Amino acid sequence: YYFLNTPPRHTALFAPFFPTPQPLMEPRVVWIIFDELDQRLAFSNRPKGMQLPEFDRLRAECLQATNAFPPGVSTTISMPALTTGRYVMSAKPAARDEMGITFAGTNAPVGWSKQPTVFSGARELGFNTAVVGWYHPYTRLFMSSLNYSKWYPYPPYQPVQNETVLRSMYTQIWSLVSPLQQRRMQIDLYQKSQENSRDVVKDGRYGLVFLHLPGPHYPGIYDPAKGTYTILSFSRSQGYFQNLPLTDQTMGILRRDMEQAGQWDRSWVIISSDHWWRDARDYDGQLDYRVPFILKAPGKNRPMIYGAPLNTVISKDLVLAILRKEISTLPDAATWLDTHPAPPAPSYAVMMLQ
């Protein structure tokens, strides 16, 4: 829906803020989706020498599900499923502010923006909401259920568009070398989405913060050896492992911002992904469908391993259960996961045929 010129179906406004009581509203959830973060290669079977200290620090004080699977094979499918809490079999843009999604067990597409979501559910419970994301136009889709939203399009879909005529001319020149231009734009959206995320995770007015961030998704944009961004990484395998340390740094930055703002110890934090690394076979011939699912409760916690299989489609219901104060501790969360299993997921092979 980045290039569809159809007008919006309606003119929406951001939702008004609920008054924030003193002390700040409890509980609070920060839900972070790192795009294409792979459980096997980032955690379970990390390449020798790969250092991800921020993720390791987080895992040492959280519930970590070691057999978590995403609801879909791609961002297009998984993000509607995660936000609605229902399996999605197919999804296609219907307008610049709408995605037609077909739920599992149904035949007709419905508008994603019209479905009950984690955002509308949080608003019904009296919580202010904030979103920072990429790929899907979250602002256009869910503005009426959000108090704040920033989103960034997928660079290959908008190689030249910009805020001013001069900048558009500049990007058109760069687009003559498309691979370099896409990496330039990926770096720009990465930096901007990180800055937006830093603002909202520190702001205690938001009871639900949802971040869909681009790391470690292709293309490679970081050189860990030099500690700088790069537009000259063209290997998918190398680029993925270059982006992993950058993603780890982002986790550390967001944590420190929350700590300094007094928000870390009062917040639930959920870390997961929309899908596994789909190019892993090109790296070592293996493909593992698992994604991370890491859950931090407010205050001090001990590490917990949750080994039962789960599908992260349950995340929406888990978030709303936390906001309703049905879950207060990590043991509570483990019990909730045991007693609220997701229905069996449709076959990933079937999803890929939709």
Image (cartoon, rainbow, N blue to C red):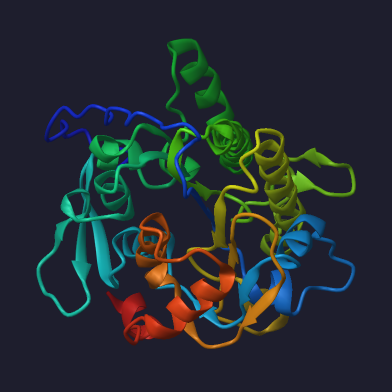
Tell me if 29 is positioned left or right of 3 in this view: right
- In the image shown, does 200 or 298 lie closer to the viewer? 298
Seen at 32% across and 31% down, the residue is 18
- In the image shown, does 120 or 278 lie closer to the viewer? 120
Quick one: quadrant of the C terminus? bottom left
- In the image shown, does 40 or 174 lie closer to the viewer? 40
Seen at 57% across and 70% down, the residue is 330
Residue 164: x and y in percent read 44, 13
Residue 176 visible at all: no
In the depicted structure, whether residue 308 falls above or below residue 264: below
Q: Residue furthest front?
A: 22
The part of the image, by quadrant, that contains residue 317 is bottom left
Seen at 47% across and 31% down, the residue is 22
Report how many numbered discs are placed on residues in the image: 0
Tell me if 185 is positioned left or right of 136 in this view: right
Quick one: quadrant of the N terminus? top left
In the depicted structure, whether residue 212 falls above or below residue 143: below
Tell me if 286 is positioned left or right of 229 in this view: left
Seen at 65% across and 40% down, the residue is 258
Residue 305: x and y in percent read 65, 80
Residue 140 visible at all: yes
The part of the image, by quadrant, that contains residue 8 is top left
Tell me if 339 is positioned left or right of 294 in this view: left
Residue 242: x and y in percent read 76, 55
- In the image shown, does 32 or 19 lie closer to the viewer? 19
In the depicted structure, whether residue 151 falls above or below residue 54: above
Residue 102: x and y in percent read 19, 67
